[in-house]
Image (tube, coloured by chain):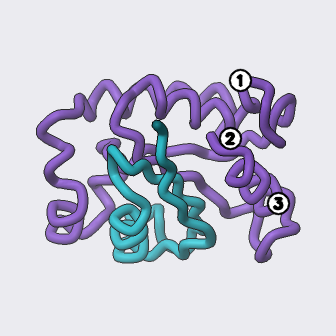
């Protein structure tokens, strides 16, 4: 099942967790389109 | 979640951003479950801190965590391992998956 194919994604990564560029690579490899990606930083 | 990001998500969800709204999903990467669940709540039922543009706004967007089993299943294994593999060692992905599934069911998506 390739349910991510054709989806449009908003990515909220985290500096101390999984960062947005890494999530974007994963989603694009699964056929999703990334519309907005940001890595948040909590201090 | 930062107010600027809430504003952007609101615009996209309402179709005023860069188009597409019906096929939109939100994917999170926070490493702590509590933080991830607060962000998930923000994009489904509204900002729980009542400080950002999504305060009182129920977008109901389908929200996922990148470390959920549902994500792992559909992302090419080599890329998934390279990008997020290290987190699979320290995060209880099964529990994470259950929590997010419950959130999606509550939001009917």
Callout 3: residue from which chain?
Answer: B
Q: CA distance from mark 2 to mark 3?
A: 12 Å
Q: Answer above or below: position of B18 versus B33.
A: below
Q: Are marks 1 and 2 in contact (CB under 8 Å)?
A: no
Mark 3 burial class by Cα count in 10 Å: few <14, some 14-19, many 20+: some
Cβ atoms under marks 2 and 3 closer than 8 Å: no
Chain designation of label 2: B
Image quarter (top left, top right, bottom left or bottom right) of the N terminus of chain A: bottom left
Q: Picture coordinates of residue B68 (x, y %)? A: 34, 42
Q: How many marks?
A: 3
Foreground: A5 or B61?
A: B61
**Residue under pointer 2:** B43
Q: Earlier in the sequence, mark 2 or mark 3?
A: 3
In the rendering, what colour is chain B?
A: purple
Q: Secondary structure at mark 1?
A: loop
Asked if marks 1 and 3 fall on the same chain, the answer is: yes
Residue at 21% in and 70% down: B79
Q: Which mark is residue B48?
A: 1
Tell me, yes or no, whether dots 2 and 3 are on the same chain.
Answer: yes
Q: Residue at 42% x, 69% y: name it.
A: A24
Disc 3 target residue: B11
Disc 1 chain ID: B
Q: Quadrant of residue A22?
A: bottom left
Vertical placement of residue B2 versus B99, above or below: below
What distance separates the C-alpha of mark 1 from that of mark 3?
Answer: 19 Å
Q: Nearer the viewer, residue A35 or B61?
A: A35
Distance from the alpha carbon under mark 1 to that under mark 2: 10 Å
SS type, badge 2: helix
Please name the residue shown 16% across and 61% down the image. Answer: B81
Color used for chain A? cyan
Marked residue nearer the N-terminal end (1 or 3):
3
Name the side, left or right, on which B99 lies relative to B78: right
């Amino acid at each position: 099942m390739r349910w991510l194919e054709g989806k449009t994604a908003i990515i909220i990564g985290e500096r101390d967790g999984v960062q947005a560029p890494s999530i974007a690579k994963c989603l694009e490899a699964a056929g999703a389109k990334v519309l907005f990606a940001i890595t948040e930083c909590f201090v | 979640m930062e107010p600027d990001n809430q504003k952007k998500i609101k615009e996209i969800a309402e179709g005023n951003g860069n188009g597409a709204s019906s096929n939109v999903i939100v994917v999170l990467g926070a490493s702590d479950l509590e933080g991830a669940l607060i962000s998930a709540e923000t994009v489904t039922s509204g900002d729980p801190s009542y400080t950002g543009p999504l305060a009182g706004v129920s977008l109901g967007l389908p929200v996922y965590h990148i470390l959920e089993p549902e994500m792992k299943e559909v992302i090419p294994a080599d890329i998934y391992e390279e990008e997020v593999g290290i987190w699979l060692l320290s995060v209880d992905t099964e529990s994470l998956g259950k929590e997010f599934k419950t959130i999606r069911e509550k939001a009917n998506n």
